[in-house]
Structure formats: structure tokens, C-alpha cells
Image (cartoon, helix red, strand yellow):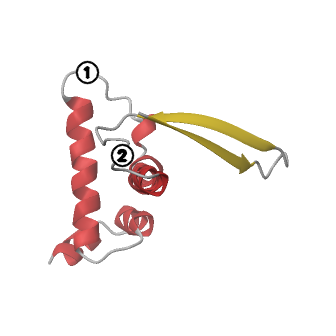
């Protein structure tokens, strides 16, 4: 287990904010240094921020009212599949692509053809 203290400047207020987080890892303390732990933590948040942003802001995942049974997991899988489809097709701006689909549903057929 490790403890990380982060400090950041809150732009709106101009105040410094300090946050303490704890990491649970199976790495032995002799085998890992602070830089490795920080790199792992930053990598986690990079994935979380990029994927969650796309799922929430583009597909409205947090606003979804699907709550029962396997519905939430199925929809999460469909959203992930769509993101993977877009990325594998070379599309880098998923938000713009989804907006194009709203105005031109045939765009999807052009994209996968």
C-alpha cells in the first residue's frame, strides 16, 4: 500500500487544494519506487478520463435511466463496442462522428463499408 499526496491549484478560486489518496498494490516496497507508482496512477486516470469522457459526454452514460437486470452492463458493452468501432475505423473525434450520425444515419454505412 502507498500514500500519494497531491496538490493542485484551483483556477476558479486561486486556492491550493491538497488531496491524499491511497494505492493498494501487490508490488513489494523494495521493488518499486515513487516514479513507478505515480506513472501507474497517472496511466489509470488517463484511461479513466478518456474512456469515461467519451462514454458520458458523447453517449450520456451517467444520464441513462436503464437500471434493471443486465441492461446497464449490456448498454456499457454497446457503448464500448461503438467507441472501438470508431477508433478502429480511424475516427479520432468520436463526438463529431456521433453528431454526424444524428444528421446523416447513412454515415454509419459509409464508415463501415
Residue 16 is situated, as x and y percent measured from the top left of the image, at: 79, 45
- Left/right placement of residue 43 relative to residue 83 reads right
Residue shown at 81% from the left, 49% from the top:
12
Residue shown at 48% from the left, 51% from the top:
34
Residue shown at 19% from the left, 72% from the top:
109
User: Considering depth in this image, is 52 or 40 the residue closer to the camera?
Assistant: 40
Q: Is residue 57 above or below residue 4?
A: below
User: Which quadrant of the view contains residue 70?
Assistant: top left
Residue 82 is situated, as x and y percent measured from the top left of the image, at: 25, 57
User: Considering depth in this image, is 31 or 89 the residue closer to the camera?
Assistant: 31
* Residue that badge 1 annotates: 68
User: Which quadrant of the view contains residue 108?
Assistant: bottom left
Q: Which class describes the residues within 10 Å of circle 1: few (<14), some (14-19), or many (20+)?
A: few
- The residue positioned farthest toward the front in the image shown: 30
Residue shown at 38% from the left, 34% from the top:
24
Residue 67 is situated, as x and y percent measured from the top left of the image, at: 31, 24
Q: Which class describes the residues within 10 Å of circle 2: few (<14), some (14-19), or many (20+)?
A: few
Q: Quadrant of the N terminus?
A: top left
- Helix, strand or loop status at disc 2: loop
- The residue positioned farthest toward the left in the image shown: 113
User: Considering depth in this image, is 52 or 91 the residue closer to the camera?
Assistant: 52
Amino acid at each position: 500500500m502507498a500514500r500519494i499526496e497531491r496538490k493542485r491549484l484551483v483556477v476558479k478560486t486561486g486556492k491550493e487544494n491538497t488531496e491524499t489518496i491511497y494505492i493498494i498494490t501487490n508490488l513489494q516496497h523494495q521493488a518499486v519506487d515513487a516514479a513507478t507508482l505515480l506513472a501507474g496512477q497517472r496511466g489509470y486516470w488517463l484511461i479513466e478520463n478518456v474512456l469515461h469522457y467519451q462514454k458520458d459526454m458523447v453517449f450520456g452514460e451517467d444520464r441513462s435511466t436503464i437500471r434493471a437486470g443486465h441492461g446497464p452492463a449490456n448498454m456499457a458493452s454497446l457503448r464500448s463496442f461503438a467507441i472501438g468501432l470508431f477508433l478502429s475505423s480511424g475516427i479520432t473525434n468520436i463526438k463529431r462522428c456521433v453528431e454526424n450520425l444524428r444528421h446523416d444515419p447513412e454515415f454509419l454505412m459509409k464508415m463501415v463499408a
